[in-house]
Amino acid sequence: MRREYLVSHIQENAHEADIYSLCVISGRLWSCSGDSKIKQWNVDSAEHELVEEIDTPHKIGIHNMAASLEERLVVSCGFGQDVYLWDPSTNTSRSLGDSVEHPGECWAACVSPDAQTISFTTVDGRVCVWDTHSNSKVADLDTKGKFGLCTAYSPNGRFIASGHQTGQLFLISTETGRLFHTLSGHTLPLRSLAFSPGSSLLAAAGDSKMITVYDVVSGDQVGQLRGHGAWIFALAFNPVGDLLLSADIEGRVKVWDMDTMECISTKNEVEGGIWAVAWYNNGFVVAGADRSILWYRAAASE
């Protein structure tokens, strides 16, 4: 079944530099950028107007942002190796930077569903877990992999996934603190990971231009989604889990039906790379190198 999505709003020049992450939190879209700002946009209105603009303490831009499932905590990571934890209810932050042992300790980040811990990938391939209350590192796993480019926390809190520069993909049990699966299928850099809402599936993509889908418990590969002609930088499951959104460096966006593992919509309104995608109640949002935010709404099915 094909689905049609239409551009409902374009916020041009939403930031003064590339937009690297998007998160929908409590009726607002959070966006972060190389301009060191976090902006919050109205999700529900037709114009999606700017609600809040935060001049963050990040010194040279923000490249990664993640939120807890319960929307109680947001973490932002900067190019200057600085890390800040945000309370979405007050928009106040505190630094984790003084607690980081050395440059490269924190690259990609994900937050546990209950906001108790944050997991980081490092430039030397480790996965480090920090307690959000004590600002202390509580786990340090050497995966024997290279640069960790992306990471994700399963919605049930049982697993952390990390994707690496060499295409290595690791699934770590939070219950044991040990490696649960090494997942095969990629030999080129992985740039995005996404768990399904039920935590049963893990999607992974990057420079191989394809998306692999894994059964989390067995570690088996259950699908390959092909159709992108360029490096894939962003993935996101919709809240129901029946659709997967993907975007690549050439500005192409695809929506996949997870029952049939087929592409049901392709959009190409963006010039340049798309670094971030997110779902909201009426559709999805994309942003990237052109510094604009595009809002899509579902139009029809056929």
Image (cartoon, helix red, strand yellow):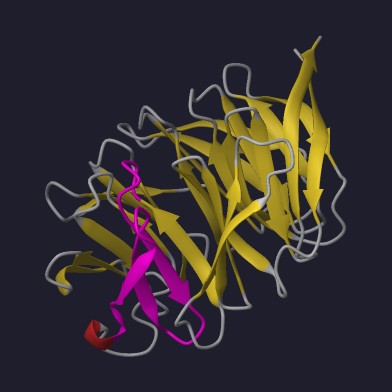
Left-right relation of 63 to 272: left
Q: Nearer the viewer, residue 293 or 233?
A: 293
The residue that appears at 22% across and 58% down in the rendered structure is 117
* Residue 62 in the image: above or below residue 74: below
Residue 223 at x, y = what percent?
56, 30
* Residue 10 in the image: above or below residue 58: above
Name the image quarter holding the N terminus: top right
Q: Nearer the viewer, residue 160 or 98?
A: 98
Name the image quarter holding the C terminus: top right
The residue that appears at 60% across and 45% down in the rendered structure is 42
Specify whether residue 144 is painted magenta: no
Which contiguous range is marked in magenta?
68-97
Residue 172 at x, y = what percent?
26, 51
Left-right relation of 209 to 66: right
**Would you say residue 189 is visible in this rendering?**
yes
The residue that appears at 27% across and 35% down in the rendered structure is 156
Q: Quadrant of residue 81?
A: bottom left
Residue 155 at x, y = what percent?
33, 38
